[in-house]
Image (cartoon, rainbow, N blue to C red):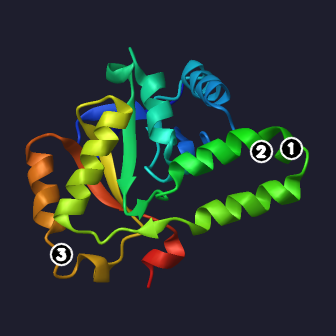
Amino acid sequence: MLETIELPGTLRRTTRLGFGGSGLMGGLSERESLRLLEAAFDAGIRHFDVAPSYGHGMAERCLGKFLRGKKDEVTVTTKYGILPSPQVGLLGIARNVARPVVRHLPSVRRRLAQAAAGLKTRARFSAEEAQRSFEHSLQELGIDRIDLWLLHEATADDLDNSDLLPVLHQMRQEKRIGMFGIGGERSHLDT
């Protein structure tokens, strides 16, 4: 059995080891992604981390399918700040059409992944935009609260003069989120 910890500020217990879902639906089909999530769950992992931008915008929905019947057994982190590409549908179609060819051409696969990553845009970190993102994440995940909601790649400048922090505190008081914070590359957070 994996070690469990209390998720800070939430009174919920989860496994110290979590599953990072950035690879879901990226180079994997939905069936492969669901099998991977099930294997992690069978291994004892009970914390799952995704974002709206992961898997060409499809990772949250995939995790939501996996969570059916398991919502009370797991904790979920998702994010707001890096928006999925507006061409998500086209990326999904291209991914499905190109998969048989790209599977055998690693250099092409890397270039396509880099091109898809370049289509992501940063959020404005406004309360209105955050609330839309939050509601969309809840819908995709099929849950009514998020245990840990991270501001994806946010900086202090993003939060200066923003109307977002009071809304985050209110969402926490309403128990819609367990805790919030900033998630990103350490090198970006230090500056």
Q: Position of 171 compared to 55: left or right?
A: left
At a point 69% along the width and 37% down the height, the residue shown is: 28
Q: Which numbered circle lies on residue 98? A: 2
For the point 45% across and 68% down, the residue is 121
- Tell me which amino acid carries mark 3: Ser
**12 over 111 or under it: above or below:** above
Q: Secondary structure at mark 1?
A: helix
Q: Are marks 3 and 1 in contact (CB under 8 Å)?
A: no
Q: Which label belongs to residue 101? A: 1
Q: Position of residue 80 (x, y in %)?
A: 35, 57
Q: Is residue 14 positioned above or below 151 on the image?
A: above
Instruction: Quadrant for the N terminus, please.
Output: top right
Does dot 3 land on a helix, a strand or a loop?
loop
Location of residue 58 in the rendering, given as x and y in whole percent from the top left corner: 51, 41
Which amino acid is tagged 1? Val
- The quarter of the picture where the C terminus appears is bottom left
Is any atom of residue 83 visible in this view?
yes
Are dots 1 and 2 in contact, CB under 8 Å? yes
| Residue bearing the label numbered 3 | 162
Which image quadrant for residue 174? top left
User: Where is residue 141 drawn, in percent x and y?
Assistant: 37, 33
Q: Position of residue 108 (x, y in %)?
A: 83, 58
Instruction: Return the mark for residue 81.
Output: none
Bin the neighbour count of mark 1 within 10 Å (Cα to Cα): few under 14, some 14-19, many 20 and up: few
Q: CA distance from mark 1 to mark 2?
A: 5 Å
Q: Is label 3 or label 2 in front?
A: 2
Disc 2: CA contacts within 10 A as few (<14), some (14-19) or many (>=20): few
> Rounded to the nearest whole Å, what is the CA distance between mark 3 and mark 2?
41 Å
